[in-house]
Structure formats: structure tokens, C-alpha cells
């Protein structure tokens, strides 16, 4: 592991760990408290009022640690901009919900429109400036697949689908942060192994989330909010695309996938059966909670599963 990678991780960890003790009381004073679903697990009702929008802390840390290395690692720029751009969308959504008391924040059309704009810019970069063109690598083989113009809808599907999956994963104390630390470390390894050139930003994400986890692990003193979860979704998708390994998300990001799929299946089954449920509750982490698992057990199991799947996925990296 290079000095730049270690330095980025250490800087982002230190910055985030330093910001959180000042940010949390500040969010308390502004009454930026989490709103908890009435139809969710009853144990979560006690979390109402816990400060949210904590994603601000690790986004500042990621940016502070990454910009230093831009001259030597210019390929990290689009990943950083996607992370910060989607973080801005999440911030607007959180702000409208919590400060302006608009129950849904940005409405679905507004949120989707903003996500499409940032994704379109990233798509343009990937095709015309990244050097990757419209080619992706196939895991567990040396093959590459040139998608041609099909790359455009494919990239949109990867980014928007992954972003929703990560957003749904942010439902238990420390869950999204821990799972994404593992994924970020895995992407750091891929980048170093294949010459991807984005190690500082992937390491910065891992370091910043480790610092954030000191305050977000059960019982959480702060939540990341959509500010954090949308940013992390964009990070995972854009990093995978820059590395030309978007298909690896199906393995390394399996938890994100199963979270969003569980919601889709729950809604479809509910409508098809006129009120019956496939899971006790969706996203699927709540299904395990209502089955008797503690929050910490769900988080631990999901993190271990992610780590094991990243090890499996590492075999498929040429």
C-alpha cells in the first residue's frame, strides 16, 4: 500500500473524528433531529431527535484528504465530484425535511432530475475523457465488453440503482458506514492492483467513515442522513465505473442489492396479494430485526457477509 493511500486514510479519519464532536452539538442546537417512521420497528422510536445530516462531517473529511492528491491522481476527480454532488442532493433533501418541515423533502421528480444531471455529466466524462470509453471488464475472466451506446443506459442504471441500494442500507446504527468501509477498502485494493489511479479517494472514504463510525455505531449519537447515504451510493457506483468494474458491485455490493430488491419485492407482493407481505418489513435489515436479531447482530452479519464477498470478488479481478 502506497504512502499516499495511507496518508489519505489517516487525514480523512482525523478530520472526521475532529469535526463530529463540534458538529453533533451544533446539529442539536439547530434541532436537526431524525424523523422516525411510525410504522417502523418500535425500538427505533427512541431514536427520534438524534441529530442527522452527519454525512457533512465525512464529506468534508473526504474532500480535505482527496484534494491534496489531485495533481498526482487526476482520475479521482470525477469520483470525488460525484460523491460531493450527490451529497449536495441529499443535503437539500434533508434540509427541506428537517428545517422546512416538508415531509418528503425533495419530491421524487426533483430528486431524480438532480441525480440524472450529475449522472449525465459523469457519463459524458466516462465516454469522452476517462480513457475507458464504453468498455467494461468482466469479472473472473480477462475479457472486456464494449457496450457501445448501450453504455449510456447501463451507466445510468448502475449509478441510480446503486445509489438507491446504499440509501436503503442506511437504516440501522452503523450499518451503511461499516458495509461501505469494507467496499471502499476493496476498491482501494483494486485500484492499486490494476493501476486505477483513484486510491486516495477510496482510502479517504474508508478513513472518514471509520472516524464517523466512532459516533454512528450503536447507540448512534448522529446519523448520516441522505446527505451521507446518497453521497456514498454515488461513490460506490462512480468508483466501480472508473475502475471499469461496475459488474463487481453485484458481488461486493450484494448487501446494497438485496436491500433495494427486498423493497421492490415487498411492494410488488403487497400489491399482487392485496395486502400480504413477503418480508416482516422492508428493507430486509428490518426483517431480521423483527425476527429477533439485535441491531448490532444485523450490522455485524451484513458487514461480515460484505467482507467475505469482497474476498470472493477479489479472485475475479484480473
Image (spheres, rainbow, N blue to C red):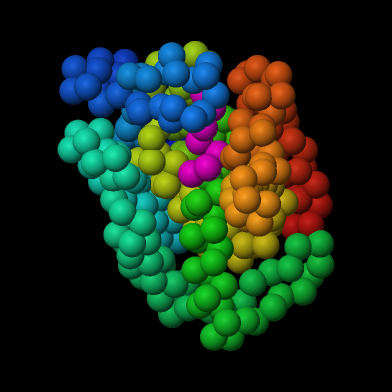
Q: What stretch is highlighted in magenta?
A: 167-174
Q: Residue at x 77, y 38 (%)?
A: 308
What percent of the width, then of the height, locates residue 279?
69, 39
What is the residue that sits farthest to the bottom in this orientation? 148
Viewer-proximal residue among 90 and 57:
90
Viewer-proximal residue among 55 and 210:
55
Q: Which residue is drawn at 28% across and 45% down?
A: 105
Which corner quadrant of the image does residue 20 belong to? top left
Specify the principal SS of the magenta part.
Answer: loop
Horizontally, residue 279 falls left or right of residue 10, namely right
Horizontally, residue 276 falls left or right of residue 40, namely right
Viewer-proximal residue among 36 and 242:
36
Which corner quadrant of the image does residue 194 belong to? bottom right
In the image, residue 156 above or below residue 12: below
* Residue 169 falls inside the magenta stretch: yes
Which corner quadrant of the image does residue 318 belong to? bottom right
Q: Can residue 27 be seen in this view?
A: yes
Q: Which residue is drawn at 62% across and 62% down?
A: 246
Q: Is residue 16 visible?
A: no
Q: Which residue is drawn at 52% across and 19% down?
A: 42
What percent of the width, then of the height, locates residue 45?
44, 18
* Residue 85 falls inside the magenta stretch: no
What percent of the width, then of the height, locates residue 155?
53, 69
In the image, residue 129 above or below residue 99: below
Query: Tag count in the figure?
Result: 0
What percent of the width, then of the height, locates residue 210?
50, 27
The quarter in which the N terminus is drawn is top right
In the image, residue 88 above or below residue 143: above
Horizontally, residue 218 falls left or right of residue 51, namely right
Amino acid at each position: 500500500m502506497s504512502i499516499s493511500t495511507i496518508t489519505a486514510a489517516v487525514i480523512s479519519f482525523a478530520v472526521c473524528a475532529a469535526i463530529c464532536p463540534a458538529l453533533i452539538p451544533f446539529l442539536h442546537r439547530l434541532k436537526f433531529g431524525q424523523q422516525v417512521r411510525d410504522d417502523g420497528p418500535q425500538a427505533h422510536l427512541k431514536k427520534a431527535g438524534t441529530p442527522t445530516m452527519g454525512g457533512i462531517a465525512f464529506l468534508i473529511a473526504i474532500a480535505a484528504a482527496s484534494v491534496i492528491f489531485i495533481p498526482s491522481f487526476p482520475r479521482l476527480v470525477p469520483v470525488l465530484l460525484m460523491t460531493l454532488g450527490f451529497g449536495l442532493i441529499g443535503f437539500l433533501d434533508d434540509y427541506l425535511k428537517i428545517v422546512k418541515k416538508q415531509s418528503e423533502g425533495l419530491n421524487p421528480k426533483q430528486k431524480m432530475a438532480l441525480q440524472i444531471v450529475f449522472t449525465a455529466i459523469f457519463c459524458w466524462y466516462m465516454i469522452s475523457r476517462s480513457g475507458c470509453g464504453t468498455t467494461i471488464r468482466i469479472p473472473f475472466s480477462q475479457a472486456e465488453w464494449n457496450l457501445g451506446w448501450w453504455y449510456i443506459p447501463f451507466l445510468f442504471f448502475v449509478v441510480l440503482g446503486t445509489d438507491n441500494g446504499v440509501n436503503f442500507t442506511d437504516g440501522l446504527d452503523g450499518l451503511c458506514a461499516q458495509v461501505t468501509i469494507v467496499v471502499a477498502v476493496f476498491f482501494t485494493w483494486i485500484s492499486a492492483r490494476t493501476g486505477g489511479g483513484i486510491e486516495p479517494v477510496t482510502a479517504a472514504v474508508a478513513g472518514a467513515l471509520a472516524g464517523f463510525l466512532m459516533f454512528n455505531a450503536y447507540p448512534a449519537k448522529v446519523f448520516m442522513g441522505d446527505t451521507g447515504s446518497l453521497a456514498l451510493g454515488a461513490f460506490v457506483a462512480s468508483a466501480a465505473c472508473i475502475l471499469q468494474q461496475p459488474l463487481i458491485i453485484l458481488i461486493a455490493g450484494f448487501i446494497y442489492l438485496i436491500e433495494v430488491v427486498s423493497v421492490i419485492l415487498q411492494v410488488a407482493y403487497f400489491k399482487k396479494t392485496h395486502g400480504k407481505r413477503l418480508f416482516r418489513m422492508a428493507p430486509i435489515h428490518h426483517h431480521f430485526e423483527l425476527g429477533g436479531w439485535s441491531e448490532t447482530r444485523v450490522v455485524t452479519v451484513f458487514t461480515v457477509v460484505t467482507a467475505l464477498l469482497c474476498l470472493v470478488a477479489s479472485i475475479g479481478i484480473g
